[in-house]
Amino acid sequence: TYPTRVDSVGSRPARASETPTTLRIDAGLAAWIADVTALTEPSNVVWCDGSTAEYDLLTKAMVAQGTLIRLNPEWRPNSFLARSDPADVARVEDRTFICSTTEIDAGPTNNWREPAEMKAELTTHFRGSMRGRTMYVVPFSMGPVGGPLSQVGVQVTDSPYVVVSMALMTRIGTDVLNLITDDAPWVPALHSVGAPLTPGAVDVAWPHNASKYIAHFPETREIWSFGSGYGGNALLGKKCFALRIASVMARDEGWMAEHMLLVKITSPEGRVYHVAAAFPSACGKTNLAMLKPTVPGWKVETIGDDIVWMRPGPDGKLRAINPERGFFGVAPGTGIETNQTAVDTMWGNTIFTNVALRDDGDVWWEGLTPTPPAHLLDWQGNDWTPASSTPAAHPNARFTVTADQCPSIAEEWESPEGVVVDAILFGGRRPSTVPLVAQSKNWAHGVFVGATMASETTAAAAGAVGRLRHDPFAMLPFVGYNMADYFQHWLDMGDVLGENAPPIFQVNWFRKNDAGSYIWPGFSENSRVVEWIIRRLEGDVAARQTPIGGLPLVHELNVEGLGLSDSDVATLTGVDKAAWLAEADETATYFDSLGADRMPETLMTELARLRAGLAKL
Ligand code: GTP
Ligand code: SPV
Ligand code: MN
């Protein structure tokens, strides 16, 4: 290793020649760092080595500066609370851009800007944007370092909060730097909070800029992010690289980058299966990834909770890795009764963002425990009591922690070659229409089900919550190219996989009754659905074939002891003809909006089949 330079190099702008001399730095990387340094004018440059000493130094500095609050080490060792600016609390989809050369390649679902124009506009924002701040150079790997399915990038950022978050969420440091050579592709990821400091000025706890841009250049595989310090806007390895840029790489190279969890399931007979599941943001991926089954004999272990990269292996089977190193999980609703495993994971070494602070120096949020403490400081630092009318934690409050602390982590979670995917699940928040579980008829029908997914919006993105919207494959905000082309890529992967293509299932934990309450208990009880799915893979249970897929026979779905009425079970396992006909009409309109000339014929045929099948019911 080499000494990390945390000392200031003075008030003049740093020069790129001031890179560590003990390390071999790729010339292309050095040139990029020189350009970025000249553009953003930081007061010093730090090459991050990913060491514990570096992490500790950064957290200490942030505590002194006010960005982090150290939690009581008795309850939560080496853990911190960050309170973001109230105007910077979630992904900003309306400020997220796909800058392909032609607009059609960004598809109708993304905001598009012409690349040169966007770079010109952003250059004016980045000019001098790091004045008075330190610029950190963070080499990171998505996936195990050097793995055959892994990819590397370098994030430059002026946010130490982003550096420590990247350290938890990705593999950062010197061994990654060694992989960056002029003949190996790497993704430059430029980030600034956009809040230059004038000499003598006092910094704020959470600097950001009202003008935000999350820009992607898919053809040149570059990311430029300006103005936000939060989550998916700023930790550029995550949604920006591992989904938006990687989806383009995957299309070009014959693999898949998906918004999915990944679990290992062991049946009571000891047979092992791996299941990947795509649910939209804040729709239950982390919870299913850490499922504690209530059904005796079943075991679920965690591999990933948000992103999966999949590629056909030498044996022709689909192999998947979790490209991340940690979890950036939703705090509210995550508690001892719903996800004990997550609670156990964050025993220490955790960064909490926008949760409430207890008087004893620990954290709290809605749903952590059944009874709120009598007094808290809310996510903005204001006094809060159970009588308060606002939530103590922001609805998109998050915990950031490495996956190796998770008690349910599978031993193969870092396997560089990945695990074989035995089934794929699609789900979302659907108060009506969609049953608890349905098995797609075949790959093409499964792709149709993925393409027609819809879900209620959540606090994970800025904007209205609870609005039903199309969210194909849970990838609406994350596909880096034309949506119809992305559907075609899924169909093409089915052709490549042939008989190795894993069966596809649709699930819905969020069906509501007329009174507006969830019918299905969810959480640990989702293991009953997992059991049915695995039994289908094994051919042990039958399915009732319907136009929307194979549904459980009522007596074969284990609902024992749940207190569900016969009509509840009928709702969960039935086909509501009128609702599905309306859904089909809605799908036709949606497909049309994606470009009739570009939409794969196969999916139009699936839609026609659905309508014909429903008509006969
Ligand atoms: P992102 O990290 O934003 O991609 O979210 P995610 O898909 O990982 O969602 P997560 O598992 O964090 O769950 C989000 C919210 O949904 C939490 O408040 C959970 O408590 C709630 N939730 C998860 N699973 C279930 C379920 O089975 N039933 C119900 N009713 N709520 C659930
Ligand atoms: C999501 O919104 O899907 C997340 C959180 O997982 S973020 O990293 O902010 O994208
Ligand atoms: Mn997510």
Image (spheres, rainbow, N blue to C red):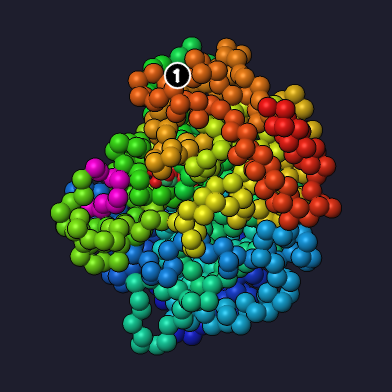
Q: Which of these two is toward me, 44 or 484?
A: 484
Q: Is residue 144 visible in this depiction of the protein?
A: no
182 and 116: which is toward the camera: 116
- Report the magenta stretch's main SS: loop
Name the quadrant containing residue 18: bottom right
Residue 577 position within the rendered picture, expressed as x and y whole percent measured from the top left? 63, 33
Q: Mark 1 CB in 8 Å range of ligand 1? A: no
* Kind of residue at disc 1: Asn
Residue 564, above or below 32: above
Q: Is residue 533 visible?
A: yes
Q: Residue at x 36, y 49 (%)?
A: 331
Does 367 lie within the magenta span? yes
12 to the left or right of 52 = right
Find residue 128 and report its image quarter.
bottom right
Residue nearest the observer in this picture, 413 or 424: 424
User: Does residue 54 sit above or below 486 in this rendering?
Assistant: below
Is residue 96 highlighted in magenta? Answer: no
Q: Residue furthest bottom?
A: 199
Q: Residues within 10 Å of mark 1 (few under 14, many from 20)?
A: some
Is residue 510 shown left or right of residue 318? Answer: left
Of residues 219 and 595, which is closer to you in this image?
595
The residue shown at (35%, 59%) is 394
Q: In this figure, which residue is indicated by the disc labeled 1? A: 558
Which residue: 57% across, 14% down?
541
Residue 147 x %, y %: 61, 41
Apparent side of residue 564 relative to residue 177 in the rendered image (left or right) = left
316 lies above or below 24: above
What SS does tag 1 mark? loop
Identify the residue at horizontal 58%, vertical 68% (top origin). Answer: 95
Measured as percent of width and height from the top left, residue 440 is found at 66, 29
Region in magenta: 362-370
